[in-house]
Each structure stands twice: as C-alpha cells, then as structure tokens.
Amino acid sequence: MLHQESLVHSCYMLCLRSKKLRNLIETRYAHLSPEEVSSVCPLKEDIVQLKLTCHSGVAVTAYLIGNEPILFELVGERLFPTVYALWRVPSLLPYVITWTNVLERLAGGADLMAPGIVRCFLEGAKKGDPIAVRLTGSGDSAVAVGSLLVDPADLLDPDRKGKAVAITHVYGDTLWAHGSKASLPKTTGGEDSEEDAQETNENESTEAAGNGDENDEKEEVAEDKDVEAVEQAQHTVQQGDMDTLLEVCVASALSRKPRLPILTSTFYSGHVLPSVPAGRNLDIKRTSYKKLTTYLAQLQREGVLEVKELSPGVQSIVSVNLGHPLLRGASILPVVVDTPEEEERCYTFPAVRELRTVTAAVLPLFRGYSKGHPLSIEEVRNIIKNYVKENNVQLTSDRRSILLDPVLTDVATTRNDRPETLTWEELFQRILSRMQYAHEITKNYVKENNVQLTSDRRYSLVP
C-alpha cells in the first residue's frame, strides 16, 4: 500500500505529547514490558503526527519520534508498528518468515502468498491481526508489516494457497523514506567486515594521495583486502542461507511424520530433498554442518529426535519429538518434483529401496520362498501378520501379544532366550534381525525422442 511508487498528495505535521500515545500502545500491545514500551515511545518525547494521503486515496496517520516513523494507522484499522519500531522491539508482533528473494515482490506492492511462508510464529494471533514479516537471512529484523488474512492453522497445511498477509508497510517504501532511511540491521559478521574493509580502503587512498609509487602500492593492497572481505562476506551469507534451508526442510520432513525407524540416508533422500522449494538447491556440504550426521547429532542434543545404530555403522532415526518448539512452529512444505530441463530428460536418478532376504533361520516361516529371495519390509510384516491370523496364535486377553508356536519359536528365539509370548513389534524386530540386509536399485532409461521407458534392477547384499 505504501510502496515506493505511492505518491503523497498532502502532508502536515502537528506536535503532540507522548503520554496519550504510550497509553494507546500499552492497551493494544499489553504483552510488552514497561522497558519495551519505553523503547518504542520514550517518556517526555515530542511526537510528530504526520498525515498522508496516498495515491490510492487511502489516508494514513503516522507518528514520528526522533525523526523516525514508529507507528501508523489506516482509516478504520488498528495501530501498526513500522519496521523502525520492530527493529527496536522485535517481539512487538507475531511474525512469519519468508525467503529473501520475496522482499523484491513485497517492495513492488505485492501481498505475501501462503506458499511463500517458510515458518510461522503466530502464537496468540488470529485472522485480521497485524503481524510482521521476516526473511530467512534477516534474523530478528522485520522487513514488512501487514494484516493476517487467514487463520494461523491454515498456514500449516502443506497444500496452502492464496494470500496470507495483506502488506501495508515494507522496508524501502514511502513511510520508511520519511525516517532516517536506515539500512536493514546486519545479522552476519561477514557483511560488517566488508563495510570495514571498504572504509579502510577509502582512508588509505585519501592519505596516500600525491605520494606516487607508494600511493599505487597502498591502493593495490587496499583493493586486495577489499576483494578478500567481499568474498568472505558472500561466503558467510551463502552459508547462513544454506543452513536455514537445511533447517527448514528437515523440520518440514519431520513434521510429515515419516514411518520410523528410518535410515538417515533414506530420510535425507526421500524426505528432506523433496521438501526443497522449486528453484532452490540444497547442498549440505555448503552448510556449516558439512554432514547430515553432524546436524542430526545437534537435533538429538536439543531433544528433537533420537538416532541409533540399529545395525553396525548404519544410523537410523528411531523417534521424533513432535511437541518440540522447533517442530511446533514449522510449516510443512509441499513436496516439489522439479521438471527436468530438456537436455536432462534422457536420465533420471536411480531409486534405492531397503529390503531383507530370506535366510535359513527364517525359512520355515516364509513358505513358498527360496533362500535369498528379496522382500520389502512391508512384505515381511504382511507375511508375519497373515501367519499369526491363519494359525490363531494371537492372545485373546491381550491383542498386542503373540503366543509363540513351534514355527515362531524356531525363527524368533534362540536356545538361551525362549520366551512364550512376544509383542507384535518384538516379533517383527526379532525376525527382521535374523534376515539379511539388501538394497534394490532401480535405474530408469528414457529415450530422448521417444516416450519409452525401460527398468533395470540390481540387488546388493549388506554383510
């Protein structure tokens, strides 16, 4: 509404006292502490009331403190804080996070669409309330303010569509231009290093003016330092953005409640990578973690999930704490299937599926199958369930337990460990542990100018 292309038809100023405005802030933002209220509207400060009429005809009343617009209100709507106020007190409004490249669209006058929201922190908010918008790389610094157009619960839907936030004010717009025009607060040390390097370059160039060869040498050194600082800043920003992308995609994948236990490699390839938004590329080697196991270990320390080695050297996620704050505020991103480019249509990545093969130890249970025959884990479970039902060995007093008959005793117990009953899960795990690990790799070949598909399968046994 107040984007840079808006025109101000009229403008006049009126000096007020801050007491009335403080009372209004305390009433409408009751969660703020007295110190936070003072940060937004200091005591005994003169308030400048600025009335604007935008090109669209909407009247806007802004309140300036220290030459910066802190609050504004539209006709018939409640009081909104500006980005200047949100930089002072980030907790002033609930907020959502969107991608960095969305800011350009918001600055051009667009509203924030629901699919562009990465994460939501809307505790206590309801439809119609003012909320802030942050970027994945802006930390606590808001870049826009608007009204929530949908219920917060609707933004957790992976198939969410339509407008989510009606933007009324954005960083770089006309209202921002009536203030100090301060830049977005920095959240990474790399960019600060870049500015310091540029200042150093300018100072050295000024002091060395008129000194001939010595001046040239100093300029070359300053330029080298400046280039090095810029490269370091770019690397820091890219790494931070890649960390955010990894965290968002992992949180989204965990929120989909994948079937556990699941191999960490399967979780990454089958759940995390499909969560990456279209047009983005997740490269875990470019994150600060470098490896998936490092990031999962951190999540385990924070109590988000639990990772165990169910077999030697093979890690699996065995449990997920869906009540953890990291997952409660996570948006479930839609699974994206990128359309390959024309020149890449002749190749698709192979699909890997975890299997088990029939061994001599479990052969009595798997009638009709030969030794070494590969089966999916789901097929193994179904065979066990069918055997239990056909032979009526499930306890009637406790439906979760199975009474072991001679065949089940033979395939699920050992000489030194022969219980009479087992739970369903204990029975599954014992039988799976006595089968051989295997993987099925399916590779597809597509002829470029033909719609023909051939499938090639290979099985590999894991000792």
Image (cartoon, helix red, strand yellow):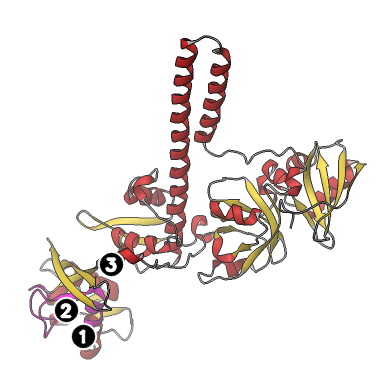
Query: Which type of secondary structure does the marked residue at label 2 adopt?
Result: helix
Residue placed most toward the observer, 260 or 225: 225
Query: Which type of secondary structure does the marked residue at label 3 adopt?
Result: loop
Q: Which residues are magenta?
A: 359-383
Instruction: Say which residue label 3 marks.
Output: 348
CB-based contact (under 8 Å), mark 2 and mark 1: yes
Q: Could you tell me how far apart the alpha carbons at marks 2 and 1 are, in whole angstroms?
A: 9 Å
Crowding at dot 1, Cα within 10 Å, few <14 / some 14-19 / many 20+, comes out as some
Q: Amino acid at mark 1?
A: Tyr
Ranked by sequence position, the earlier of labels 2 and 1 is: 1
Instruction: Say which residue label 2 marks.
Output: 408
Residue placed most toward the observer, 323 or 452: 452
- Residue at image position (54%, 17%) is 204
For the question of whether residue 297 can be seen, the reply is: no
The mark found on residue 387 in the picture is 1
Pinpoint residue 301: horizontal percent, then vertical percent: 40, 48
Q: Nearer the viewer, mark 3 or mark 2?
A: 3
For the question of whether residue 235 can be seen, the reply is: yes
